[in-house]
Amino acid sequence: MTTVTDSTADTTTARRALPVTDLSLVVLVGATGSGKSTFARRHFKPTEVVSSDFCRGLVADDENDQSASRDAFDVLHYIAGKRLAAGRLTVVDATNVQQEARRQLVQLARTHDVLPIAIVLDLPEQVCRERNAARPDRADMPAHVIQRHRRELRRSLRGLEREGFRKVHVLRSVEEVEAAEVVLERRFNDLRHLTGPFDIVGDVHGCSSELETLLGKLGYVDGRHPEGRTAVFVGDLVDRGPDSPGVLRRVMSMVASGDALCVPGNHENKLGRWLKGRKVQRTHGLAETIEQLEGESEEFRAEVAKFIDGLVSHYVLDGGDLVVCHAGLPEKYHGRTSGRVRSHALYGDTTGETDEFGLPVRYPWAEEYRGRAAVVYGHTPVPNTSWINNTLCLDTGAVFGGRMTALRWPERELVDVPAERVWYEPARPLATDAPGGHQGRPLDLADVHGRRTVETRHHGNVAVREENAAAALEVMSRFAVDPRLLAYLPPTMAPTAASREDGYLEHPAEAFAQYRADGVERVVCEEKHMGSRAVALVCRDADAARERFGADGVTGALHTRTGRPFFDDPAVTEEVLVRLRTAIGAAGLWEELDTDWLLLDGELMPWSLKSAGLLRAQYAAVGAASGAVLPGAVDALRRAVERGVEGVDGLLDRQRGRVADAEAFTAAYRRYCWPTEGLEGVRFAPFQLLAARGRSLAAVPHDEQLAWLDRLVEHDPTGLLQVTRRLVVDTGDEASVRAGVDWWLELTGAGGEGMVVKPLAALVRDAKGRLVQPGVKVRGREYLRIIYGPEYTRPENLERLRQRFLGHKRSLALREYALGLEALDRLADGEPLWRVHEAVFAVLALESEPVDPRL
Amino acid sequence: MPGEAGAGGTILEGVFLTISTTGIPERPATDLGFLLHKHPERAQSFSTSHGTAHVLYPEASAERCTAALLLEVDPVALVRRGKGKGRGGAPDSALAQYVNDRPYAASSLLAVVLAKVFKTALHGDCKAMPERAAAPLPLRIEVPALPARGGAALVRALFGPLGWSVVEAEPIALDPEFPEWGDSRYVRLVLEGELRLADALNHLYVLLPVLDDAKHYWVAPDEVDKLLRAGDGWLAGHPERKLITERYLSRRRGLAREAAERLELVRLAEAEGLDVEDVDNAVDETTDTEERPVPLAQQRRDAILSALRAAGAVRVLDLGCGQGQLVQALLKDPRFTEVVGVDVSVRALTVAARRLRLDRMGERQAARVKLVQGSLAYTDKRLSGYDAAVLSEVIEHLDLPRLPALEYAVFGSARPRTVLVTTPNVEYNVRWESLPAGHVRHSDHRFEWTREEFRSWAARVAGEYGYEAGFVPVGPDDPEVGPPTQMAVFTRATTGSDENTDENEKEGRA
């Protein structure tokens, strides 16, 4: 495959093209003064060229300081390595006349799986000398340096291909250098410009009849699709099956006519070596193929050999969204060119261990795969195909009596036909799972750890800082429910802007005004329940839970806002799920939403159920302390006043006011506490259906949502479910706004916590296209005592509290909201678990950001 | 909504105390005014960083004189101090916020205010009547709501030895309407006795914050000097000297530092209405068992070390390293060339780093050890390629349904040649005298297994991942109930390797 171009072969051409692969490491070779830097400047972008002189300057402040060479080359290799890792063409401008220097560069290219290419400037000594003489910094370079370089260069010339350079271009005179023109070539595997649509066909193994049936089912007529679709074969066309020549004939003609692409499988590779006359073991079904081919003509065998020889190990297709190869490929190898890339594409990776059948244990690369491109492959026969981390194995063991499967791309539809019979007995039973699919497709720490950016479709990139991720990791690892059941965490919610109303810190008028300003005409006010947030994942039965969420032995989950199981006792959780499930069934929502699971967001009451610790440590403690202190303090002040001590009256009045405030405070929290026994006394008020099969429901308008939820409550005979009272307000209509305010006054006057105002249409953007707050809370005057303390309503306190700053809280609420939506969308799209978890985890991490907890 | 909770506690009832004395005509009680440097007929106010302190006398006669100290804390100012940019008007440093908006420390605040308002009295100075300041007088001090971690018993233990004839500490119920909630952490304190006023004030100055224990931070670097000064003459001989000193100094400083490091976690804990201590993983192994002469923890480490040596391991992972005791033991044996301590708790790692003195370790030693945050609920590429992994007293801190993820992360993904797992043997619990029947050994233990349960778990995991499991008792092996700790030694099965497999072999195997 090595290309060598040499001037002696091609002296007459005026302009000479030097082909250079678009992702490669170009090594310039030439004595000092041979014009490498000038050449590099002329043919490459300045940023593509890394020069040893420049690196010497970086480490030693002197481009000619030879004593700094070792460090300079370390830097050069480092920079070149970073560029290659990022997939950028890189040119090394150094003399590279010594074999050792080149060996390191070839190694570097291999490390990054790109082709090393040499461009040699073999110019006469005279030219080099004159050029150096013209440069002040090199004028006094001894002549023997050039001579030595030239000697080393000449010695090297013939061995460059052997050293590993895949293209070698030699330029022998000033004229040739002048005439040279670098031409970038696309890599063979780079077919990003082809957008299909494609039909990717799994392992065939000589099953010619099944292949014809499958192609027919896919709509191909005699190897051509009337709508111009392209078939893509993942390899292993041959061996084991009854008619490998027939399969080859079909595929070769489709490839030749441009109706198909084909990547090689390990079986083609071995057959190719046999065809070349190499000695191979005729095992694993090769014997059958050889026998079949011996019945074919010499010409056909030669054609097959040529076909196999020309196969490219993998293809990157459809703008980079799709990678097809035989045995799977990690992202870092996509579009790369090296022996090991080819080897991985053909054979996959193994762990080094062998199983009980003596076969190598495959390395579960797909488990670790986090790439954006879908990787479609075959090689490992599996009973059922399923996407794992955006990879799909299409080998469903047709030759072993399974099925032959194809994937329609970009539709992502599977099409399969059953095997006509068992053509070949497998050496080991088909794995019950795709490689890497066992044990619930574990998550990797790299998916959540450290500083991260999560892309959201509704709010752009959301950053998570390292320390926040660290805290979330601890909570998630030690307390959260199984991440497979944790599809969502609720976002925080901002309060309304501070009110100017006398005696109020929060008041609905500001909430309505804010939404009006955001262009939201209709909002729904929902009663705010004072309990603890609870998210319920309700599956129709344990089978549904297993099938969709991969969780064994449960029928769902009930967790808190940080992902903890709501109840310590799984039996209580199950009882809640049973009641929800019954209500969902009775309300007919399984059918209506065409789902066998539902995710609900709601509030579980009483507050004292989950927050006993908080009550004890904070709220009741305040009440207890005030009760113990204030009477004594008031008494002491009263006696001082009675004694005629002056200047105590004001203080006495304030303390008396405090007594009243403290009583109001205690009354405020007591309202949300009542005893429970098992589920006796427990209430759950759902306020949103978040998701159902294949669908996020987060953008369903709230009136529709509430209609569903009302039906749920109606169909719950146990009294667990509680309705959420609501009122729709037109933010532009004064009377409607007034009605909203009155409703809130009534609600909070009767001891309610307050209300949440949400855009009726749920997911709304403002005129500038930005997300609007999904809700703002307007808390009751008495309730806020719990938050801001018994005395917050005193005018001087209120005045200062009104200066509270909401910017950070609002931003946090939006970011968490967007992450929550993202998690639901990813869940709906059937994205890999790590993608859903990434967004959920980020919500938890953001919850540890510093923000005034009273907001 | 627990999530938005937190600030209710900023209210400062509790910041009140009275000091009374009695007198006779030739030695009138009103001398208290001289001793305190506060005139009995005037109400005086002092502005402090936390609000306004008032001193006034509800009674002042020759027979009886009472001074009252009342701090009007400004709750709004407390949390608004240093109005933060973009943080909702919270203080500029998150620390301040999370410290101040707890139900803190009326007593800590009182101590600060005492020191400010009664500075001269605290030092025992009194120019007007130095002889009175130097002599005991009958005193009655009442603090109606004193936060006391350790309860009434500790209050009595702290004030009891200091010469008070009456030390009354009466718990205050959290809420009479909810008797099931029990007592609050406040007690009503009454002290009576014949003491020098300065001594009495110094007792309060030191012991109020000690009883409060936490949640209020000093930044003064001279805290040791202050303690020595205030404790002069009584602290050295106090039977609870250790607790007093620790709580006053090291623990408070440690907490301050830890709080700064773990604020993110504090917030997540508060979102659930929990204390960060309930969420943190820094398991204190001393609470786990207290057997003499060789503590079980030590025996466990010895067993682990010898199993590691027997396995020939030199590069070792300590998964769930906690505060780094095992890492420390491993480093003492030079055969272990690389020791990686992994824990999910950043606080535990910080403590471990301090214990190992990582920042002062020589380069060569430091190169042998690494402490990283990690979680066994996830696979982790950094953990591949080690000889051995130790999971000492780790699995029982996981909910059973999440154990398979750990199994996969360790046995399926990291796949060291040797894995050691230790866990309590629940059968042995009947032998712990201090452990009430049916209780687990640590409040965070999600389960404790019998020998049978542990063995069948280990056998299943070994089978699933290609390991062989052996079992080693740790601690005295009781004939009836077995050892207190059980250890499984997993060794990766060597069913051959295909490292030498040639290309031909590799090819056909699809």
Image (cartoon, grey):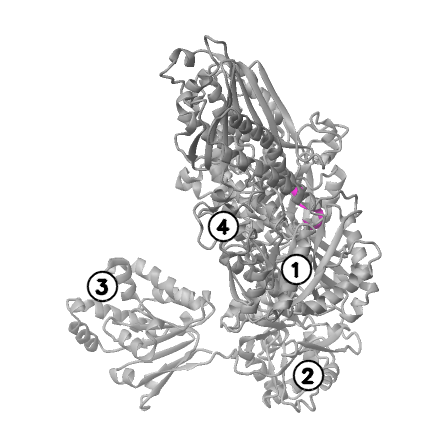
Looking at the rendered structure, the secondary structure element under dot 3 is loop
Q: Mark 2 vs mark 1: which is more N-terminal?
A: 2
Image quadrant where residue A172 sits: bottom left
Residue A247 shows which numbered tag? 2
Q: Amino acid at mark 3?
A: Asn
Residue B418 at x, y percent in the picture: 61, 45
Q: Chain of mark 2?
A: A
Magenta stretch: give its range: B396-402
Categorize mark 2 by other alpha carbons within 10 Å: few (<14), some (14-19), many (20+): many
Q: Amino acid at mark 4?
A: Glu
Q: Are marks 3 and 1 on the same chain?
A: yes
Q: Mark 2 vs mark 4: which is more N-terminal?
A: 2
Q: Chain of mark 3?
A: A
Looking at the rendered structure, the secondary structure element under dot 2 is helix
Q: Chain of mark 1?
A: A
Q: CA distance from mark 1 to mark 4?
A: 24 Å
**Residue corresponding to mark 1:** A742
Residue A64 shows which numbered tag? 3
**Residue corresponding to mark 4:** A799
Q: Are marks 2 and 3 on the same chain?
A: yes
Looking at the rendered structure, the secondary structure element under dot 4 is helix
